[in-house]
Amino acid sequence: MRIALAGDTMLGRGVADRLATAPPTSLFADEVVAAGREADLFLLNLECAVSDRGEPWPDPAKPFFFRAPPVAVEALRHLGVDCVTLANNHALDYGVEALADTVRHLSAAGIAWVGAGDDLARARAPAVLERAGVRVGVVGVTDHPSDYAAGPGRPGVAYADLANGVPDWLPETIEGLDTDITLVFPHWGPNMTAGPVDHVRSAARAFLETGATLVAGHSAHVFHGVGDRVLYDLGDFLDDYAVHPRLRNDLGLLFLVTFEGPRPTRLEALPLALDYCHTRLATGARYAWVATRFREACAALGSEVTESAGRLVISPFPTAPGPGRPGAGPRARRRRWVGRRGR
């Protein structure tokens, strides 16, 4: 079994403007699409609503609202995406009508989703995918914002205040999955951090202890290192965001994880260049920057990275957490570096 994993994928705002004049197949370079299609399953974080309805969420302190046109789903189909998580801080940017449309458009395209729904039970429900007789369970959760949390009879996202511990429903959901592989897909931690903060590391350990096969997080907008069966942050995959001058959220990774039986045994990461509303493979100096950054981030978590045929490889997969470095703590300030990038 091989699973492709990509991080924050934002199809609204500048990307939506591009889709008004360009086909959905133009958002990703052919070589990125081909790499994703090497996998048996492809999962990513959908960082927007998909709808032509709704009004911006009534929060005067919220600076960014992301909504993609319905045709954007065709970009996910072109990539071969099988499942997305909606557990993030943009799923309800245009209210419950737009969330309902998002689910409807995904369903019509044959794409599964987790992490949001029309009530608390549906938002927390895992997805179960099957390929060649292998069953993969996917659990979605976000630690922000609490305003978007689903409740009894109230649409929203699967929310957990991970900075104050892992709530009982998450271990119960993980333990209750009768699947060969269990993937926890959390949207966690603050933006623009070079590595996982303390509460993210604690939650990852809890997920593994309760039966997760692999944890793959996102939210920081930049990729982090890989530890004991944890990809702490997948980084960005497609957007129109402003570029952080030091952490370079315009450079990313597409991850391919190979499993033998229930355990991950090999990771291949493809360096990406995120141009304005278009993602391609990184080359030259951009490739070198990603390779150096990923190697250092993984070394801090006890993982060794090699290179093979233009890919960054971890094999065998690490089986014990390295000493790492202390994070910024659960009270680390959340910052948004997602203003519109200049053309």
Image (tube, rainbow, N blue to C red):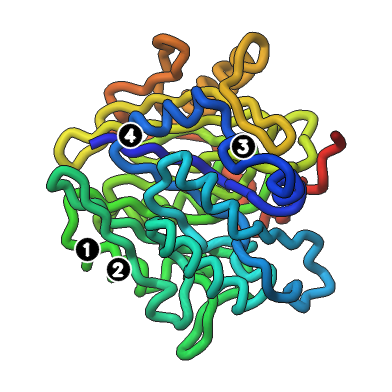
Indicate which label's residue lies in the foreground, 3 or 4.
3
Q: Which element carries disc 2, helix, strand or loop?
A: helix
Q: Position of residue 144 (x, y in %)?
A: 60, 65
Q: Residue type at mark 4?
A: Ala
Query: Is residue 83 placed above or below 240 in the rendered structure?
Result: below
As drawn, the label of residue 39 is 4
Which labelled disc corresponds to residue 177? 1
The CA distance from mark 1 to mark 3 is: 35 Å
Which class describes the residues within 10 Å of circle 4: few (<14), some (14-19), or many (20+)? some
Disc 3 from disc 4: Cα separation: 20 Å
Q: CA distance from mark 2 to mark 1?
A: 7 Å
CA gap, disc 1 to disc 4? 22 Å
Q: Residues within 10 Å of mark 1 (few under 14, many from 20)?
A: many
The residue that label 2 is drawn on is 173
Q: Quadrant of the N terminus?
A: top left
Q: Which amino acid, by three-letter code, is at mark 1?
A: Leu
Give residue 45's position: percent from left, percent from top: 51, 51
Q: Position of residue 214 (x, y in %)?
A: 32, 45
Q: Nearer the viewer, residue 27 or 243?
A: 27
Mark nearer the viewer, 1 or 4: 4
Q: Are marks 2 and 1 in contact (CB under 8 Å)?
A: yes
